[in-house]
Amino acid sequence: MDYSKYPAEPFRIKMVEPVAMISRKERERAAKEAGYNTFLLNSADVYIDLLTDSGTNAMSDRQWAGLLLGDEAYSGSRNFKHLENTVKDLFGFKYVVPTHQGRGAENLLSTIAIRPGQYVLGNMYFTTTRFHQENNGGIFVDIIRDEAHDATLNVPFKGNIDLEKLERVIVEKGAANIAYVCLAITVNLAGGQPVSMQNMREVSEICKRYGVKVFYDATRFAENAYFIKEQEPGYADKSIADITREMFSYADGCTMSGKKDGIVNIGGFLCLNDEELYTEATELVTVYEGMPSYGGMAGRDMEALAIGLKESMQFEYIEHRIKQVRYLGDRLLAAGIPIIEPVGGHAVFLDARRFCPHLEQTQLPAQSLANELYIESGVRSMERGIVSAGRDRVTGENHMPKLETVRLAIPRRVYTYKHMDVVADAVIRLYQRRHEIRGLRFVYEPKQLRFFTARFEHI
Ligand code: PM9
């Protein structure tokens, strides 16, 4: 084993949670009872849970200690001060509004910054983000570079915004009709692909020229910062903290789900520089989340988040994090399994189009593959394809994303390299009998964010 390529865990394990695998017959029953939707499985029926890296992280001893310092006053909690000061210090924004999780922040931002009929430009959609943008009358326009929609292209910084597309849309629609640019670091549905510092700088320059605001989806900012350090000329000797500070210097604010790079189980926030927007956000947060000094989080949650944000920027932590995910990807690539390349920050994405070429996209190949992987091995993953993409609000037609994938998302500090081996072996076994994977169809389709609670049956 090359330990610089795949570093050992930079932590000792001091508490464990036993996991068990039920039999294949029981998994078949569980999958059926869950309507062939991996979201609806009971966690007790799952062996290795790669459904999401969101809120599934293992907290450190310091974070657990922080929980005991929770100041559960209704308002003015000292833990909020700690969180607020930490975020201001790390990200450099003027104002911080706490929320219960990322979509709470998305709701606030979309409500205060979008007028109905305005366009919101983004580097690929994300499910909850686009929901809130559209729910507030925004029209989402994807301006990510074309390569991001092709799973086979192995190019760095595949999450970058296409600057020509950005400028063209601003000129065509008129700057006044652009609500803002939403730049995600990293881009989840493109495979956890990072955005380069140069791209952030150039996006900021163009947007400033036209008077358009730029808000980041900062959910996986530390992973993005690591990729910049590793791959962008001029950043090898900079700390993750310096890179983070520079990244955010090109933004007017951000939404954050603390459940990812905050390394906690719940929490989030909105950052802003504009005082008027901040005032509006504080008025609105009391409606949907709670006081501007807790926003739906307990005091102890805010304490754990303040500590987790700092831990996610420690070099040993983030290097292991990225390289453990890469290890799983490398094992799959070595076995000829089709995945999104390059391997991104938080997950490995199986390319269901190439895995199941015998299934049409309308036969939900990624949903089918995710289910078969569970039945094969007890490994839970998530569909990220046509089901997640949902329907066009105007025409009612299915969005047909080019990427039809199954995401193996790795929770932070939870699983070992051996677990990655178990997952890789399961995928490889399934690949050998991939022709047996049958398509699915909806039997229950929720009106919004359908992937969470939809039910399916075999065609
Ligand atoms: N992401 C994920 O599994 C959890 C919910 S969707 C299955 O990837 C980005 C880039 C995210 C994200 C959540 C949110 C919303 C915003 N942006 O889940 O509300 O990946 O904290 O964050 C999930 P919350």
Image (cartoon, rainbow, N blue to C red):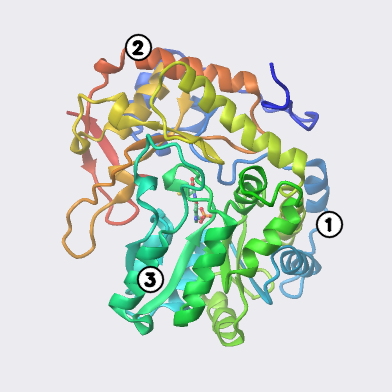
Instruction: Label 3: state its secondary structure.
Output: helix
Of the numbered discs 1 and 3, the one sitting upstream in the chain is 1
Question: Which of the two residues, 412 or 291, is positioned nearer the viewer here?
Answer: 412
Name the mark on residue 167: 3
* Amino acid at the residue labelled 3: Glu
Amino acid bearing label 1: Leu
Please give the label number shown on residue 69. 1
* Disc 2 element: helix
Vertical side of 142 occupied by 274: above or below: below
Nearest to the eye among marks 2 and 1: give it: 2
Find out if the beta carbon at label 1 lies less than 8 Å from the nearest ligand 1 atom: no
Q: Residue 67 in the image: x percent, y percent?
A: 78, 52
Where residue 47 appears, x then y in whole percent?
53, 23
Determine whether, in the image, residue 443 is placed left or right of residue 366. Answer: left
The quadrant of the image that shows the N terminus is: top right
* Disc 1 secondary structure class: loop
In the picture, measured across the screen, residue 240 lies left or right of residue 398, that is right
Q: Which residue is mark 2?
A: 432
1 and 3 marks in contact (CB < 8 Å) = no
Residue 200 found in image quarter: bottom right
Counting residues from the N terminus, which is met first, the one under dot 3 or under dot 2? Answer: 3
Q: Amino acid at mark 2?
A: Gln
User: Is residue 288 among the parts visible in the rendering?
Assistant: no
Closer to us: 272 or 293? 272
